[in-house]
Structure formats: C-alpha cells, structure tokens
Amino acid sequence: MAAYDKLVAEAAADYQGYWGRLARELVSWKKPFTKVLNDSDAPFFKWFEDGTLNVSYNCLDRNVERGLGDKTAIIFEADDGKVTTASYRQLLAQTCRLANGLRSLGVKKGDRVVIYISMSIEGVAAMQACARIGATHSVVFGGFSAQSLRDRIADTGAVAVITADQQVRGGKQLPLKAIVDEALALGGCESVRHVLVAKRTGADVGFQAGRDVWLNELLAGQADTCEPEWVEAEHPLFLLYTSGSTGKPKGVQHASGGYLLHAALTTKWTFDLKDDDIFWCTADIGWVTGHSYITYGPLALGGTEIVFEGVPTYPDAGRFWQMIQKHKVSVFYTAPTAIRSLIKAAEGNEAVHPKKYDLSSLRILGSVGEPINPAAWEWYHQHIGGGRCPIVDTFWQTETGGHMITPLPGATPLVPGSCTLPFPGIQAAIVDETGKDVPNGQGGILVVKQPWPSMIRTIWGDPERFKKSYYPEDFKGKYYLAGDGAIRDEKTGYFTITGRIDDVLNVSGHRMGTMEIESALVSHTELVAEAAVVGRPDDTTGEAICAFVVLKRPRPTGEEAKKIAAELRNWVGKEIGPIAKPKDIRFGDNLPKTRSGKIMRRLLRSIAKGEAITQDTSTLENPAILEQLAQTN
Ligand code: PRX
C-alpha cells in the first residue's frame, strides 16, 4: 500500500507527468509525443496527440523483437476440448497475412470493419489486423441478432465484415454467416463491399460472388510480413456499441495510444502479470472486457493467455475448473454471474464441484461486470482460490476502456463486495446532484474528476449525445458521469458500487437499455400497443428483465397469456438477441401513468419485485391498474 500511495501522490502532484511517464514506459512510439493532454476542447480530450504508434506492432512485433517469438501467445481451447496454440511469431504472421488481405481488398486507414465471429485465434488476429492497417474495428457479439448487427453495420458505415461460416457453443452449431447475409439484406448496409468468411465447421453457407471471400483463400496468397500503418495516438482503434438509457445503442469510440496504455498498465498492475503466468479472461471479444483483457492488454505485455470458444456448462459445469487444472491457469478473470451459476451447479452435483480439480496453479482471481455479492465472493475465495488468492473486483465500463476502481492484488486489503480504491491516477469521486462532494458513508453519484488516457473519445457520429450522456451540464460539464451510484466506507474510503442510476439493466453482466427492449416489443405492431420494461433482482443473473405489456387485444390470461408471452420473447430475441429476452412478461389493460401520461416505472419496479406498494400513488391516473398488474403472472 505504500507503493500504491506513492503512485497516487505522484499523479496528484503532476498528473500529466505521471501519465506521460507511464506512456513512455509501456508503449512503443514510432514518433514520441511531446504533449500529454490537450484539454482545450473539453470534454473532447486528446492524449499524446502528436505521438504516432501502431497498436498491433506493440502487441506482436515488439514481443518478437524482444526474443519472445517462440513464446505461446494464445492457447485456444475449442468447444470440444481440442487445443491449438499460437506463438507470438505465428500470431504476428497470421495477423500480417490478414492485414495484407484486407489491404488487397482496398481496406485502408480510417475505414470501419465489423467483426462478427466467435472466440477464436482468427477473431483476435482480425482485430489486430485492423489495428495494423489503421482500420477501426467494431466487434459485434455473436449472440446479437441480424437486426442488431444490421444497425451496427449501418451506423459504422463499415466497408467489410469479417465472420465465420458458423460458431460452436455448448455442442451446438449456430449460424454466423447466415445472420450476416440476413443483416445485409435488411438494407442500409450499402457501404459493405466484402464479407470475409472463416471456415469453422465447413457448413454449407450462402456465397455471393464478388462480395464474399473465403478467408483461407484470401490468406493463402499473402505475405506474412506487413508494414504497420503508423497512426496518430488519437486515431480511432475501435468502436464498441453499448446500451444507454435512451435511444439506440451508442458506438463508444476509443483512441489508439491512451487506450493501449491503460489496457497494458491495468493488466500489469491489477493482474500482476508475470512472464510465466497463464492468464485466462473468460469474456467474449464481443465485449469490452475481451478487447482490453484478451486482445490488447495481455498481448501488449507479452503474456500467455487462454482463448476459450465454449460455455462454462458444457460438457458439464466443471468445465472452467477442468480447464484451469489442464492449462495450469494462474490468473483467472470471470463474472459474478458465472460464479453464481457454477455455485448452484456444484451444490447440486458433487462431480462438478471445484474440489474435484487441482486448482493449485491459481494465484489471482478477478471479477468484473456487476457487483459481486459477498456470498459469491466467499465461495470464489474459498473453493476456487483455496483461501489464498486475492480477488480483484474490478469496476469499469465500456466507456472507460480499462479498470477504474479495483484492488491491487497482494497490496490492497480486501473487503468482499467492495471494489476498494481507485486505480492510481484515476480521480474517482462521489457527488450529489449538484456536483458537490458527499462525505464518506453517504451514497451518491459516481464521477471521475479528471480525464484519463483510455476514456471514451466520443459517440460515433453523435458528439452531442456524448456530451449530454457523460459530461452533462448538471455537473457544469466538468466531471465524467459513470451512470452508477456508489458509496464510500466511512473509515476506509473504500468504494461500493450500488448499481446504475439510469434506465440501464445489468443482466448476467450484459448491459441492456430498458428503452431498447421496449422499442423491440412495440415494434411488434400487430400485437403490442404499449410496453414498459424494468429490472428486478435475480439470484443468478443479478438482474432480470421484466416487461409489462398492453396488447392491442383484450388482456390474455392462462394458456393464452403464456403463448403470447413466448411469442413476444422470441420476437425480442430476433430483434435484439437472446440476451434481451424478458424473463417475466405481464399483461395489463393499461400501465400506471401520471395524469400527464408518464409511466411510473418505480411502481412497476416494486410490482416486478413482488413488493407491496408503499410509494405515493396520488398522482396516478389509474390506481386500479396496480392491483391488476400485481396479480398477473
Ligand atoms: O454498472 C456497472 C457494472 O457494469 C457497467 C458497465 O457495463 P459494461 O460497459 O458492459 O462493461 C462491463 C465490463 C467492464 C457499470 O456501469 N459493473 C462493471 N463492473 C462492476 C460493475 N458493477 C459493480 N462492480 C463491478 N466490479
């Protein structure tokens, strides 16, 4: 902790000097920067702006030049358990061939490329190849529907899509290319000139000559060296879509230099990554965790990591523990939702209990994506970490690029359920609605008082929305607003995140906007007149999606209600993706509204939880509706 305090003091004394020093130490620059931060156009901050670099050079070539060419970069385990590895030299060659292939198709610096592929070495190489030629990638999680994929392709104006014939998860073959075809057929994606298709299963898939290209054929003719495109530090490395409280998902834009710095630095300090570690982050590359702690952070440091194609419950719920044993994983990073579901599985079945496996290789455990409840924390600590491994509960967001509040393992004294203290250099604080600091022990709004290198730069194509969402006038446009509530412990100053303060839900660590799900429901124009979506606590998934729906026909009951609920669930699955399917759907003749017509969501939240309504309902236009909604199942 003395070292931690020293770093915090260094950042406090000379903020720019601190980040400048780290950026020189961790990132290799083609042209060194002379200026650390440019805040003249706040909140559009620029970091290291006159420096140039290439992110893929930093993650691959640099390691080969350091003598790590034969070191394993990726240990890939397929859904069926088959293992393939790639050394740094091999991953560099594969990335270069793909980068050359993209260039041969006319893809160049500044173009956007959408990647819709499952967990694979190809997926990581595709991201690295885009970075190599200065193309901005936007990875779309393989669980999103054709409609969601279309929206993202259209918003980015991508010139190419990289995908595979199929994906394999939990023993099942699921479509990828067919969904790309469907997405492109929906229209609005005229910018797409090419679809690159990797062969995963060899399944028969549609092929449009001229547009579609088999990846293996494209790569066969390419050289395995490729001169990197040296880009300015602020050049957009990627766009990643995430949900906000209003409107459609927003394309969070990240820069190259600052992002790479924080991805590398947090991997180094939060995970204490050492040369002989086997690091495993179980996230998907479709989420920010997969970007920072699979594709970029561990590779920038020359680490060895696991990339896993499958799911934690196949062939059984011992899969994670069996893989930790098999690959001698030393640093393991997963989400509370996975831990909670594996606790349930282990309690129900001795055969998949972690005690059956040798987990002695582990030295550090991590948690991300949602608050970890103390019971899950204790189980993780005891049964997975053998009571000896520190747990780093890392709070951060798609927008922050890397860890913001987290313990540093072995240093920070741990308290279950608290993400403890800000990462050195991050000025996290808790304020009230007017932007005034609140004392410890009193909850408030989580903000970051100073810009940091890996922060979101803008929302793609919508700078106004960026300003409004993250630097609202309420705080005089000065502080970054995270969208979460938090409280600091009176004695230790430790942070505990109390959850989102906007209309964003966190279901199994996946961020969903209630408005997005409502829009999906009401787009079923034949059936749905009106819909309101709220969250309710759920033991396994953290939060569950609960939809209140008014149909264009009389309120259904019994079997009919079940049938329509199933139809609407599938509809949402098709509109957004299976992760957005409401767990509960309740039908009403109406929704609780104020006399001015505003839906009273806090009442719906109480009903969804099964709580008695204690709030003031005097402004309600139609109080009788509450009883009806409470009765429906
Ligand atoms: O509410 C916080 C929660 O997840 C949100 C960010 O979601 P997303 O952008 O999808 O990124 C998830 C992976 C970084 C936050 O606003 N969250 C994330 N980590 C934690 C957390 N809540 C509590 N504790 C955490 N460690």
Image (cartoon, grey):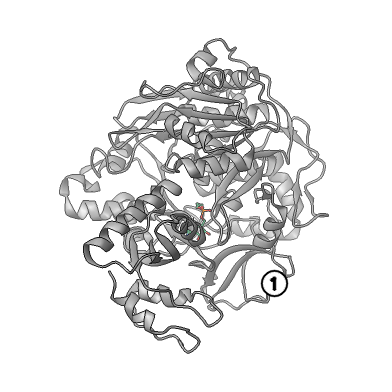
- Which of the 4 image quadrants contains residue 6? bottom right
Circle 1 SS class: helix
The residue at 66%/60% (across/down) is 470
Quadrant showing the C terminus: bottom left
Q: Which of these two is toward me, 78 or 555?
A: 555
Quadrant showing the N terminus: bottom right
Q: Which of these two is toward me, 77 or 70?
A: 77
Residue located beneath label 1 in the image: 474
The residue at 42%/22% (across/down) is 199
Amino acid at the residue labelled 1 = Asp
> Is residue 483 visible to us here?
yes
Instruction: Tell me residue 310's x, y (percent).
Output: 34, 37
Instruction: Tell me residue 49's x, y (percent).
Output: 78, 42
Q: Which of these two is toward me, 546 or 541?
A: 546
Q: Which of these two is toward me, 500 or 31?
A: 500
| Rendered position, 605 above or below 388 | below
